[in-house]
Image (cartoon, helix red, strand yellow):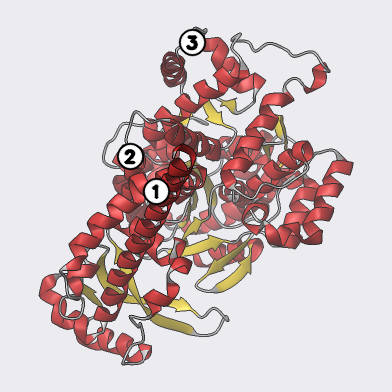
Amino acid sequence: MVEPISTATAVAIGAGTTKAIEKSTASLVDRISIKFAKDKYDALRLVLDKGLPSYLEANYAKCETLKTLLNRNDPIALEDCFVAPDFETGGESSSSDEFLEQMNKSGGKVVITGLAGSGKSVFLKYSFRSVIEKGYSYYPIFFELRSLNRASKNKGMLLAEIFESIHECCESFTRAQFNYGLKSGAFYFLLDGFDELNQEIREQVSDEITALARNHNKCALLVTSRPSDEFVAWEGFTEAKLLPFDLEKAVEYISKLRFDEDKKQDFLADLEGGEFEKNKDFLSNPLLSAMMLLTYDSFGEIPEKRHIFYAKCFDVLAREHDASKGRYKRELFSNLAMEQIERAFMFFCAVSYVERIFSFNDEQMERFVNEAIDACGVEANTMEVIRDFRESISIMERVGLFYEFAHRSFQEYFYAKFVVADRRLTLEQKIGWLTDSFRSEDTVDMIADMDRTYFEDEFLLPNVMKLDQKLASIDPESNPSGVLSKFFSRMHISSRRRDDGGDIERDIFYTHTDGGANFFLRQAHWKYYGEYSEQLEEVGSAREMEKDKVVALLDSKFGGEIKVHHTNNAKLIEVEANILARRVKRAISCLRAHLEAKQAKRKQGLGGLIRQKYS
């Protein structure tokens, strides 16, 4: 029989791959052979010469390079553009290597959360390579969850599709081997992009991920996603927040990018001269900082608003395809004007975003582009428009059998642009679904910034008025559930490490309900809070009991949680939930009054101008 290590070494290709896989397989085989030595199913051992060498090879190569916004047509080595982020878990920060070492020791179950462009997917590629290169005692399995959007919706689809992704690399690898690896805890699952799942399968996949963690708890499991409240309900999982770059990491990242050195140094000088602190929201994000370098090169300034930033970035991409032609303006493949291509891309993004499709097979791509061409009322060849999207403005790329955005945030920006430009649909129709289900507040924030009056008058104020009217007759002191049930499903104890890194402390936590009411509460409590903070503070929020006593009471008398329901009002009052109910009701009322005052002032001001000009 061929030795597994020899087989793995033979199949390893590419610079550095042989050494990395050889080192890893030595550790893996030692561990696996010990695990399987006493097992009666010795024939099903997960030895590397039965499929996994091919899988490791293929995915190592896939994780060895990546394309960036600045290198869309020329993949670069991961180490040439990767800066390891830091993480925060339970109030305690750690480096990437410390985080991965802890994962390896504990076989943990972790959800990594971060905003768009923060580097979640790139970190998982780094993690895959680290598991191999550092000889961790697991087989790393890298899987993009969005591929489930195209799979048959059957029970057990998650594990079935993960197995198929391995089986595609080597047909000799069997489901029996895969199941044995699950049972033995031999796998290190790296599941990328939970937030990219279609809504109709999201709950099922959530259940299957938690079942995987529960039923095969010897396997390590990392999941990435944008932030969401639903992870609170993932029993046994810890949330690790991917921290934004500080100035040092931002400078390191920009320094690594392939770009004109003189222009890059000018940009870095501005960052270190104070621009980083002024624009930390952008510059602490790897994707946005690279995009900002592009726009800075062309416009010599850093935009303050996100939608202006994306608009300028698109303008750079649109003009870039002519840069090497001097004064000659090359025609687009479709023979459309750039404005028409931009409009077609806007419709393309609008429909695909609503349908929650983020990557496209050939049939989907042609269908969406055809619809976009029809919506624009122009005549163009579908394939040539697709070619313009890919080659002329490089905002999409072909990855294997699918088309993908240069980054998904462009799809969000162009949906926001469509929402503001369109007046055939109501604003409720266009963004109500965002606030109900997806908590896509980056997109909603861009819409609000693009046209604040439209957003407030046509969407925010009408909905806040309805909510305020529902709460008006409810007494939060005697009926706290009447207020809180609009926003929360239960009150319970949450444990976390102190922000100063001290002991674990317990606090009161409220689980959010589904629906748009929470969006309006966040607007009232955070987005607009500064406009009426004094009025809101008048209602008071101080507990009569100390927090520790409330936690102890909730734990000892009510088992650590209370369902927010009218039958539990006495319990909720006893643990002082009425204080939060009072504050929530007042916050919604304050937001309504503020928006009504702004609307009246706008109308009065316009009326005065009309009378002045025409009297």
**Residue at which label 1 appears:** 603
- The number of numbered badges drawn on the structure is 3
In the rendered image, residue 337, in percent from the top left (x then y), is placed at 61, 14
Q: In the rendered structure, which amino acid carries the disc numbered 3?
A: Val
Closer to us: 413 or 557:
413
Q: Residue at x 20, y 65 (%)?
A: 471
Return the x and y of residue 349 as percentages of the image width and height. Answer: 47, 29
- From this view, report whether residue 159 is shown above or below residue 365: below
Q: Which residue lies under the disc numbered 3?
A: 378
Residue type beneath disc 1: Lys
Check disc 2: other Cα within 10 Å, few if <14, some if 14-19, many if 20+: some
- Identify the residue at horizontal 32%, vertical 85% (top origin): 551
Q: CA distance from mark 1 to mark 2?
A: 55 Å
480 sits to left or right of 229: left
- Residue 43 seen: no
* Residue 231: quarter of image: bottom left
Name the residue carrying label 2: 157
